[in-house]
Image (cartoon, rainbow, N blue to C red):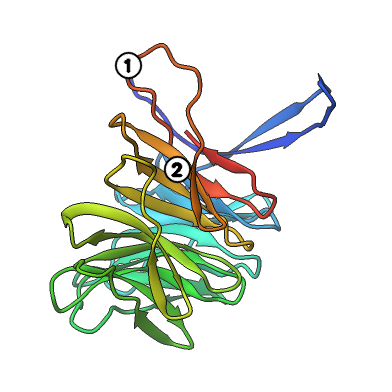
Amino acid sequence: MAVLFTAVVLLVSGARTGAQEQHQSYTVTDLGTLPGDSYSTATAINGSGQVVGYSYIDEGYQHAFLYENGQMKDLGTLPGGSWSEAYDINNSGQVVGVSGTSSGQHAFLYENGQMKDLGTLPGGATLSTANAINGSGQVVGYSWTSSGNAHAFLYEDGQMKDLGTLPGGSYSYAEDINGSGQVVGWANTSSGYLVQHAFLYENGQMKDLGTLPGGDSSRAYSINDSGQVVGVSGTSSGVQHAFLYENGQMVDLGTLPASHSYPYSRAYGINDSGQVVGD
């Protein structure tokens, strides 16, 4: 039995007044797929309702898409590549993601109908990925370096800047950037290769956000224009909990009521109103 997946958009409207919840309506729109297959995934949407993601095609490879005006457009690949995935779009319609190339995979910026190769950090010739873009066109992600480890990067003004690592660490990954150019992600620490901490990069410095009490690792996935950060952290009980970081404090967002023995949560996104989503 085949299981088919297609990208969807869920539109939610409605309101609550006091303790009384008024009617809420939900519309799920099937975005379809690119010609030739039955699978697609939506990864981001901007303020104008443009959606990006990736869909499989005839040749069995995935291609990045832009969905607008009821149509799914194939964004193609970088020269020599056979696949691509789009991860974010800003309100100007600029799209970022990753594409195969003739020698590996590179971060791309798609604008004005063209997919631009953002290259890599020095020495990391074969691998980079762009994860997010802000309204100013600043792009963040990660790239391999000459050391053989990945480093978070900030791409602006045609240049890819190495954001470095936390003290004593060897690798870092940037996940999101806000309108002020603050960057969040995660990096390993001096405590070991597998001990990762969420970071906030601002004013040329990478700040360790630590963990929830008793936890050993954390990752930051999203930041809003107020500088509020969300992600996931280990806890003293040994399970992961979603966190909200603001005013210098990491707050445990808890979990949904659960009867099983592993009640975890993870936060992946936050908007400018401070609403948080995750699982």
- Quadrant housing residue 39: top left
Question: Residue at the location (48% across, 31% down)?
Answer: 254
- Which residue has dot 2 on it? 40
Q: Is residue 18 left or right of residue 201?
A: right
Q: CA distance from mark 2 to mark 1?
A: 33 Å
Q: Which label sits on residue 261?
A: 1
Specify whether residue 38 is in view. Answer: no
Question: Residue at the location (32% across, 16% down)?
Answer: 261
- Quadrant housing residue 90: bottom right
* Residue 244 spot, x, y in % from top left: 52, 47
* Residue 116 spot, x, y in % from top left: 42, 78
Question: Residue at the location (77% across, 26% down)?
Answer: 24
Query: Crowdedness of circle 2 by 10 Å Cα count: few (<14), some, many (20+)?
Result: many
Of tags 2 and 1, the one toward the viewer is 1
Specify whether residue 165 is in view. Answer: yes
Give the answer, above or below, for where 234 lies relative to 182: above
SS under mark 2: strand
Give the answer, above or below, for where 180 lies relative to 64: below
SS under mark 1: loop
